């Protein structure tokens, strides 16, 4: 047992971490049989385990819910109750805990995330002392704040999962201090709570308090504090030439309260704080009076094998350092209070934290009390932590509205009583802690809030235009995000606090890390394939993925780069707008089955690690291209955007290269601002024979970026049509008049009448005539109509894709098979198809010939954007990319249609 020596002031800590006895109690007999009594006999299933832990870390208890018991013995010297008090402190126990010492019940607690303690002085004896804990974590947790534990998310967490400490303190001691910085006067207002004063006698006039403030070991100020009869004291401490805390310069002050009696220190309490102020006004966040742009990531605090517990001694330090290396200045600790050790590293290394309580599922009197008690305790625990700058109350209506579609719940959008309750919560939190921003209901309907935040899941370039339109709506009409406007929507900064695209993790490496199949591979509540990793290897081999990628690792790398490409564009669109105050990407790391992290679940780097840091850095450059696809007789044109989130005025050369040319101009960017340089690039592109990709690059100091542009030949002839034999006379039937005219202008032989004399048919609808033609041996190219719909109910079945944001779409992947299409679109299509991604995909079987496939999540819902199916004696090739209206205006659309036009549509060797 590790024991710290007693300090001069009388405080002593004894760690009770280590080996405890543990037994489950599925029949709830422990109390009746007196398991809490000293030397009681526990069942044969009792085993030893290390505390802290969650019992789900052990396979045999992974599915267990209900009651479990802990017991250990500690040897202590005879306590001097006249000179010291002893208390048993718990960092966190999930969910309910009742504690006995030597058979005497000393207290109980409910709440799975925050510290609690009991005075055990009178229960301790000289020599061996037995401590017993009964923990209950019920199966039905709907009214219990549980965050993302269990269905439909991640592993449940139960048990004594943070430290257990036995502490001795003097009878009169400091219970807590709260430091409120005032940057207007450079003053730290210190509030002191004492315990142990004899209040009936009007306090103890012989006890005096002294507040000592130091900076890096050097004294800053010493002030006496008057202690009132109720055990509270206050003092304003002047901080000369105060250093303000920021993520870039995380200046901390140590504060100590000495309690003295008759010239001797009887208790000493130490903490630290930062001189920091955060405000929201006029649509911006201000840190220490200066505008500050948030670049954040969601962080859920789950770790492989250890779940809520840190996965190593340097876990939190490494987490904060990596976040800063990636360009983040904030982590949103999602839907449960942050671990206190994480907050200390955030304070010391410099990282903002957005913190929120765990939410329940339903809205009842019990769940409301539990949420607010948790919120109050979180504020109390972390009040002095300068890194914490935002409190949330609820997330996406979880536990207050109706995101789950429950029959007994109503939405916050329509329930005025819930709106009033939430507004009252906001006011109460603001009064309790005026030093931070408060977000009432993160991401969804707001009522009273300092932050107007949105959760928006767009994939780019697939839905790039829709993302721009959504940003326009956010910034033009912020009040539309409010169910009621108890606070001014125009004052609250707009922050997109959830967004992001998935990028498949190296699943075999994850399995190697566990040494077995990870338990989250096959949770019963996970949707097959989409969220359930189990069977991913088989799905890879059984689908067209194995044709596109020689090995699983190649799929992983390609998908991760697609994740980067999407997130890059979504981030850049926000950073280019000064009326967007920040963003929080989902998420910092993969969590179990959810592979949307910048890091994987092990906190290992993904393929794009260094590139992401450049996109997300405090200084960044962007290329805003007029078009991503151009003809070879046109011009590549682009604006440049320089983003400066620092507090320095920047002046540097903005340099570019494009199509063999280059240029530069001097650009000045004020602190925390964005500059758009219009028409920076206007370069005639070279003549090409086939579709070609040109890379445009931009530099501003150390900030760099690159963007691809697709260049196509402006040829007047399609004779012969690609893939057809030279001199073939049979015309092609083309149903769409505009497409028919465009092909005819290029010399193609096309007709407006479908009969058995045509070589092939290009249609947007499978009419009876088309079906008869293909059954008779004809080849048909079926294109999505100009609105993106596919008029076919006979040949393929279709899955329709949302035209706006979609959680499924950000978890999806298009992939190309075949050398000719890969040369045009790449193995994973990107900006070549800007504005032309499908609104539907065709369901396919192993008999279909897939040219561009589509999957979601863990290789689920295999479908295709381009696929060929035998139908009767003929073939139908469907293309759901929206290319039909781009044939005359977009070189990639034209090249893709040309590629799909040949007579022998069904033969793979012709692709």
Image (cartoon, rainbow, N blue to C red):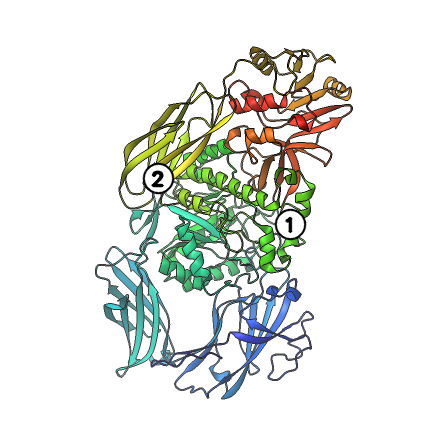
Looking at the image, residue 744 sits to the left or right of residue 712; the answer is: right
Q: Secondary structure at mark 1?
A: loop
- Disc 2: CA contacts within 10 A as few (<14), some (14-19) or many (>=20): many
Rendered position, 809 above or below 439: above
Q: What quarter of the picture does the C terminus occupy?
A: top right
Residue occupied by mark 1: 532
Residue occupied by mark 2: 643
User: 301 or 595, which is in the foreground?
Assistant: 595
Looking at the image, residue 803 sits to the left or right of residue 177; the answer is: right
- Percent of width and height locating residue 885: 56, 20
> CA gap, disc 1 to disc 2?
40 Å
Rendered position, 67 above or below 797: below
In the displayed orientation, state which residue is furthest to the left. 240
User: 493 or 844, which is in the foreground?
Assistant: 844
Looking at the image, residue 572 sits to the left or right of residue 309; the answer is: left
- Percent of width and height locating residue 147: 54, 56
């Amino acid at each position: 047992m590790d024991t710290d020596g007693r300090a001069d002031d009388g405080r002593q800590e004894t760690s009770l971490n280590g080996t405890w006895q543990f037994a489950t109690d599925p029949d709830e007999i422990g109390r009746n049989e007196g398991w809490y009594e000293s030397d009681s006999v526990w069942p044969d299933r009792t085993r030893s385990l290390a505390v802290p832990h969650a019992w789900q870390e052990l396979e045999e208890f992974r599915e267990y819910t209900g009651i479990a018991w802990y017991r250990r013995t500690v040897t202590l010297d005879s306590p001097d109750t006249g000179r010291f008090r002893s208390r048993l402190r718990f960092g966190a126990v999930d969910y309910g805990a009742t504690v006995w010492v030597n058979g005497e019940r000393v207290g109980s607690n409910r709440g799975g995330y925050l510290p609690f303690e009991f005075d055990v002085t009178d229960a301790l004896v000289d020599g061996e002392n037995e401590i017993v804990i009964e923990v209950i974590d019920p199966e039905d947790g709907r009214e219990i704040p549980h965050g993302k534990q269990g269905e439909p998310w991640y592993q449940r967490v139960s048990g004594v999962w943070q430290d257990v400490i036995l502490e001795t303190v003097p009878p009169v001691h400091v219970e807590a201090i709260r430091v409120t910085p005032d940057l207007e006067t450079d003053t730290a207002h210190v509030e002191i709570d004492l315990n142990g004063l004899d209040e009936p006698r009007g306090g103890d006039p012989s006890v005096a308090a002294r507040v000592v403030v130091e900076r890096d070991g050097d004294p800053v100020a010493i002030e006496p504090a008057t202690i009132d009869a109720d055990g509270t004291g206050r003092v304003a401490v002047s901080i000369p030439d105060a250093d303000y805390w920021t993520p870039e310069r995380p200046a901390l002050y140590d504060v100590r309260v000495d309690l003295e009696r008759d010239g001797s220190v009887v208790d000493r309490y130490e903490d630290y704080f930062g001189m920091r102020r955060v405000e929201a006004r006029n649509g911006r966040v201000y840190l220490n009076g200066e505008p500050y742009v948030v670049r954040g990531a969601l962080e859920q605090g789950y770790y492989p094998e250890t779940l809520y517990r840190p996965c190593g001694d340097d876990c939190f330090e490494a987490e904060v350092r990596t976040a800063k290396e990636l360009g983040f200045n904030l982590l949103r600790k999602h839907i449960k209070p942050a671990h206190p050790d994480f907050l200390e590293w955030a304070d010391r290394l410099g990282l903002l934290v957005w913190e929120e309580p765990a939410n329940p599922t339903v809205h009842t009197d019990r769940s409301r009390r539990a949420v607010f008690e948790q919120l109050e305790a979180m504020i109390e625990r972390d009040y002095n932590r300068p890194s914490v700058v935002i409190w949330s109350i609820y997330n996406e209506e979880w536990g207050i509205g109706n995101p789950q579609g429950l029959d007994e719940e109503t939405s916050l959008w329509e329930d005025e009583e819930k709106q009033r309750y939430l507004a009252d919560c906001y006011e109460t939190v603001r009064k309790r802690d005026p030093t931070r921003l408060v977000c009432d209901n993160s991401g969804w309907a707001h009522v009273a809030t300092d932050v107007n935040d949105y959760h928006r899941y767009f994939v780019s370039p697939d839905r790039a235009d829709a993302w721009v339109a959504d940003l326009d709506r956010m910034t033009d009409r912020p009040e539309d995000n409010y169910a009621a406007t108890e606070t001014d929507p125009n004052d609250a900064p707009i922050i997109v606090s959830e967004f992001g695209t998935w990028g498949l993790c190296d699943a075999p490496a994850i399995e190697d890390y566990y040494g077995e199949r990870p338990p989250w591979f096959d949770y019963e509540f996970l949707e097959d394939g989409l969220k359930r990793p189990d069977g991913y290897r088989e799905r890879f081999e059984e689908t067209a993925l194995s044709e596109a990628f020689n090995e699983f690792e190649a799929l992983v790398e390609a998908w991760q780069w697609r994740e980067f490409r999407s997130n890059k564009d979504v981030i850049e669109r926000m950073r280019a707008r000064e009326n967007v105050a920040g963003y929080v990407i989902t998420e910092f790391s993969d969590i179990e089955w959810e592979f949307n992290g910048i890091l994987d679940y092990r906190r290992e780097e993904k393929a794009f690690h260094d590139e992401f840091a450049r996109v997300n850095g405090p200084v960044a450059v962007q290329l805003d291209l007029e078009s991503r696809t151009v003809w070879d007789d046109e011009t590549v044109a682009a604006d440049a955007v320089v983003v400066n989130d620092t507090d320095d005025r920047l002046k540097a050369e903005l340099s570019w290269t494009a199509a063999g040319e280059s240029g530069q101009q001097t650009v000045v960017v004020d602190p925390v601002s964005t500059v758009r340089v219009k028409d920076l690039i206007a370069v005639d592109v070279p003549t090409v024979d086939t579709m070609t990709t040109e890379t445009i690059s931009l530099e501003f100091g150390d900030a760099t970026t690159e963007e691809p542009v697709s260049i196509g030949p402006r040829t007047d002839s399609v004779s012969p049509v690609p893939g057809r034999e030279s001199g073939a006379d049979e015309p092609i039937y083309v149903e769409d008049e505009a497409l028919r005219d465009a092909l005819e202008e290029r010399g193609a032989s096309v007709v407006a009448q479908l009969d058995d004399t045509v070589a092939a048919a290009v249609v947007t609808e499978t009419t009876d005539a088309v079906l008869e033609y293909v059954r008779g041996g004809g080849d048909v190219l079926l294109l999505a109509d100009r609105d993106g719909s596919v008029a076919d109910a006979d040949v393929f079945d279709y899955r329709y894709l949302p035209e706006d944001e979609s959680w499924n779409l950000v978890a999806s992947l298009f992939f190309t098979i075949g050398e000719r299409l890969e040369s045009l679109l790449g193995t994973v299509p990107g900006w070549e198809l800007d504005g032309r991604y499908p609104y539907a995909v065709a369901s396919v079987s192993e008999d279909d010939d897939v040219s561009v496939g589509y999957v979601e999540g863990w290789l689920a819902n295999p479908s295709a954007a381009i696929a060929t199916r035998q139908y009767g004696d003929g073939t139908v090739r469907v293309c759901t990319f929206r290319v039909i209206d781009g044939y005359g205006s977009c070189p990639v659309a034209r090249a893709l249609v040309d590629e799909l036009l040949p007579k022998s549509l069904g033969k793979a060797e012709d692709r």
